[in-house]
Amino acid sequence: MAKVLVKGNEAIAQAAINAGCQCYFGYPITPQSEIGEYMGKHLPKLGRTFITAESELASINMVIGAGTTGTKAMTSSSSCGIALMQEAFSAMCCAEVPGVIVSVMRGGPGLGNIAPAQADYFQALKGGGNGDYKLIVLSPSTVQEAIDLTYKAFHLALTYRNPVMLLADGILGQMMEPAEFGEYPYKDPDVSEWALSGANNRPARNIVSLHMPEGAMEELTNRIFEKYALVAKNETMYEDYMLKDAKLVLTAFGSVGRVAKAAVNRARKMGMKVGLFRPITLFPFPDKALHQVAQNADMILDLELNKGQMLLDVRSAVFGACPVEFYGRTAGGLLTPDMIMAKIEELYKKLDNTEESKAGVR
Amino acid sequence: MEGELSVIISGFGGQGALFAGILLCHTAVLEGKHTTWFPSYGAEMRGGAVNCAVNISDHDVPSPIIDKADAVIALNDASQEKFENKVKPGGFMIINSSLSHHKPKRTDIKYINIPLNELAQKLTQPAFVNVMALGAFIEKTGILKLESIKEVMKEMAKTVSAKKAALLPNNLECVEFGANIIKNQLVTV
């Protein structure tokens, strides 16, 4: 199939349709409204379900309803809309209900603004809902990757019976570039063992998130965390861009990853050994791989469109192997290649000086 | 033409600045090039200011966000003011002199003043200043072929309503005329 010019939001919607998404429930909010619009236009024609819910709270609870029957379902929203869904995410993880959530981040906190941002990393990765739980979080950086990871999101949700979040931002949602859809590449697991399908000729089942008997909740949580360990073992993804000899390693996720790549290209042309480590799965975070990279690097520069959120996971993975610097803008302020380049030059000079002084000691 | 090029297209809502960017991207795809389109988005309305940044390259385009562009197409006066300092030194600006009368502020870029509204309205009704500007841009840069953008327009006309498709001849005339403005040096560059 040839490449087509497509907008990030519409690419996600079409990929969800290709993935076999039967139900979309959502409430419009910039910068992701095109997802709902696209679904509204196409799902009914395919005999599938599209509902504009009365709120984000309703949307995600409809996803739970569909998910308990083993049906592929999704919702999409942005920052303050996703905030309203946190309680349901916790419930889904506990009850092991699959579902796909697309979060296209905008400026915050509060209602914030509609400009691109990445300040909902904590919201996606560190909860908001109660209890020990984790969403599987995938972070696309190009429209092509948005398509590929939407496919993966539906597959992982059913495979691990856990909600999966596609964490994008206003840049990726609104931009257009050529991409290829191909076909949904996965074979999904059989859901008949657990799905609520009507108890005709079989004993009744229930799917709940309340477990009162002594020890039951701890046992369940331990089992769910064994599942998360398996997710970490099997599904961790990251991009290694010119890391082999890199002295200064940039870390960035999503759209910032690609802007950082432009800066890496420029730095390399100027003879600076700069590389990019881009986590593609944010949970599971590629911490072992990043630690290895840090051991061979002189410094890490973490770049984000927030005040330093993934930074905590970067520091935790690096674990003192090398210094970690942070550079970010937030609430709609963008990082451009020039800005990143200026920061690279500033830090790289420090590295060079350090090496000279080392040489002096010798 | 080989290479890479970035352009900002800006105007007031309704002039088709965003659509012009999409047309360029489709043309780039048709020619097998890499391309990105990133718009100002959200609260804009007819009459408000809108712009998009387009990259066209033979190689992968990492960043859709650009600091400075090789070219700016300013379809109204506010766009000239807003983006004059966004042109790379040695770059150029196509200015719709029907709507913008600002004196040039820079000496390190070229200004191509075209009275797009007058010329387009004389040529066809309804007129398409965005497409005429694209014709001039393509001829000036040589990054894409005029035939390719015409091909894209013809293909697009097949996917829209009959009412819109009926405007294809006007669009083709405007883009051709835009290219001729540069080719025949009808304006001083």
Image (tube, coloured by chain):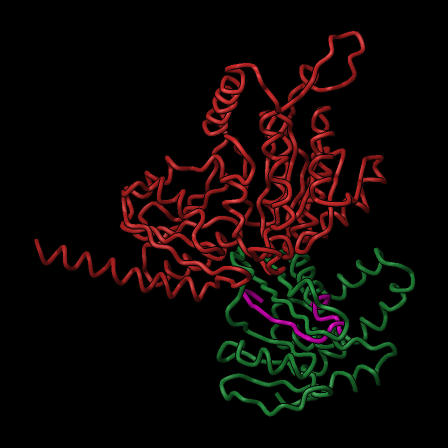
**Residue A153 locus on image (x, y percent):** 61, 35
Evaluate whether residue B175 shows in this view: no
Q: Residue at horizontal 65%, vertical 25%?
A: A187
B9 falls in the magenta region: yes
**Residue B33 locus on image (x, y percent):** 60, 58
Q: Is residue B89 above or below residue A252?
A: below
**Residue A6 locus on image (x, y percent):** 68, 52
A343 falls in the magenta region: no
Q: Quadrant of residue B11?
A: bottom right
Evaluate whether residue B112 shows in this view: yes
Taking depth in this image into account, of B177 and A103 the one nearest to the observer is: A103
Chain in red in the render: A
Q: Is residue A194 above or below residue A30?
A: above
A238 to the left or right of A202: left
**Residue A185 locus on image (x, y percent):** 64, 32
The magenta region covers B1-20
Taking depth in this image into account, of A323 and A235 the one nearest to the observer is: A323
Chain in green in the render: B
Q: Residue at horizontal 69%, vertical 79%?
A: B75
